[in-house]
Amino acid sequence: MTNPIVSINSVEIHPIVIRDQRVLTFTQVDEVHGRPKGTARRNFTENKSRLIEGQDWFSVSPDEIRTTSPGAISDAHRSKLTVVTESGYLLLVKSFTDDLAWQIQRELVNAYFRVNPERTVGERYETIIPSEQQTLSELAQRKVAHLAPALQGKGLAEIWSRLHNKFRIAKYSQLPRTQLADAIVYMASMELRGVPNADHAPRHPASEPLTNNDMANLRRVIWLISHRFHYEQAWTQGVWYALRDATGVRSPNRFTVDNLPVLTQEMRRILQAVEPLVQMRNEAELEVLRRVVRRREQAEPLIEDWRARLMRSAKEDHGEIAHTLSGWMERDLEELAARAQAGRDYPEVDEPTGQRRH
């Protein structure tokens, strides 16, 4: 099977498909972003402890790449290569914050990673639907509920890593429906190995307020939502209102450590509601450009078609648009729940002063 070459930022990328998903080499990342050779590898080395093998990156042999993606690498390659998935790529380029870098990231996600490659071996199979994905997510949450909040993120990372390795998938949304029952049994019987016994794990007092680091992690997720919309300030206010309502913590009282599970769950709910809308908006924008602008078609039929699709997607549990979250969004939610060290802060989406007084 051959994969069409993708051109981004005037750089031609020969798609590499590993385990039914597209990946990038460090060289490809450096070239498409116009960065000095070795930049992506350096970022990977510095952050490797936070990346998950089998989910964010793979170590593959040249022969495996040549089998699944003929022509993607030269015949001179003999040693193993490290390749990054969509989530791994987005984590590596977090430090690339200029306007061009943002544009390249968006193009890579939409035109490279999100293009479903044809399976190179075996038959196509039906993967689990969003409601079944939620079942696995809730099961994982129950497995770590007895742990101290600071250890829950580590426990979740272990669960997902072992599940991915067991069923040879990059993310749990790729699990075949025929293996769902086996996955549930496997997760239910799993004993966590990488976290201390909960009985001996230090617990935070119930009344301990969230730290500045915790709030930076929370603002990061809020920014993921609000910055994607024209009415950014209104979205920021709306998300803060939802968080206050979900936790029952009235302004100006501070959220506490005990609120973290509810805050994480509420942010997940909002992201899962927002993602289909953003995806549909992006697809509609491209279709208007292609059909109305370039082909000079009438806009009204296209608008009516998209309105009908939006209504249909809202009514269906797993409609035309996937309600799953990308790997980097899942990672940000995990870091919020685990109280991980925050990266860049987004004070511009802090809770509005007027809203705190109500």
Image (cartoon, rainbow, N blue to C red):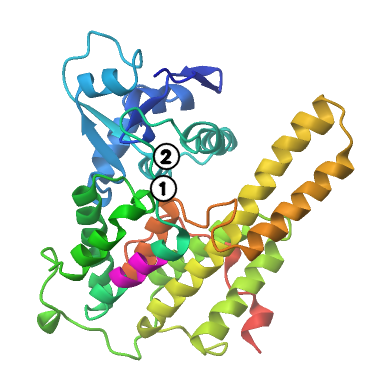
- The residue tagged with tag 1: helix, strand or loop? loop
- The residue tagged with tag 2: helix, strand or loop? loop
Q: Is residue 193 above or below residue 127?
A: below
Q: Is residue 267 above or below residue 99?
A: below
Which residue is at a point 66% across and 81% down the rendered structure image? 355
The disc, 1 or 2, on the residue closer to the chain's N-terminal end is: 2
Q: Is residue 55 left or right of residue 321?
A: left
User: Residue 60's x, y, as percent?
Assistant: 21, 29
Q: Which residues are magenta?
A: 134-140
Q: CA distance from mark 1 to mark 2?
A: 32 Å
Question: Dot 1 corresponds to which residue?
Answer: 126
Label 1 neighbourhood size at 10 Å, few (<14), some (14-19), many (20+)?
A: few
Question: Dot 2 corresponds to which residue?
Answer: 93
* In front of the other: 195 or 173: 173
Q: Is residue 282 left or right of residue 51?
A: right
Q: Is residue 246 above or below residue 120?
A: below
Res 191 → quadrant: bottom left
User: Residue 124's x, y, as percent?
Assistant: 39, 38
Q: Is residue 235 left or right of residue 204?
A: right
User: Residue 275's x, y, as percent?
Assistant: 57, 56
What residue type is disc 1 on? Answer: Glu
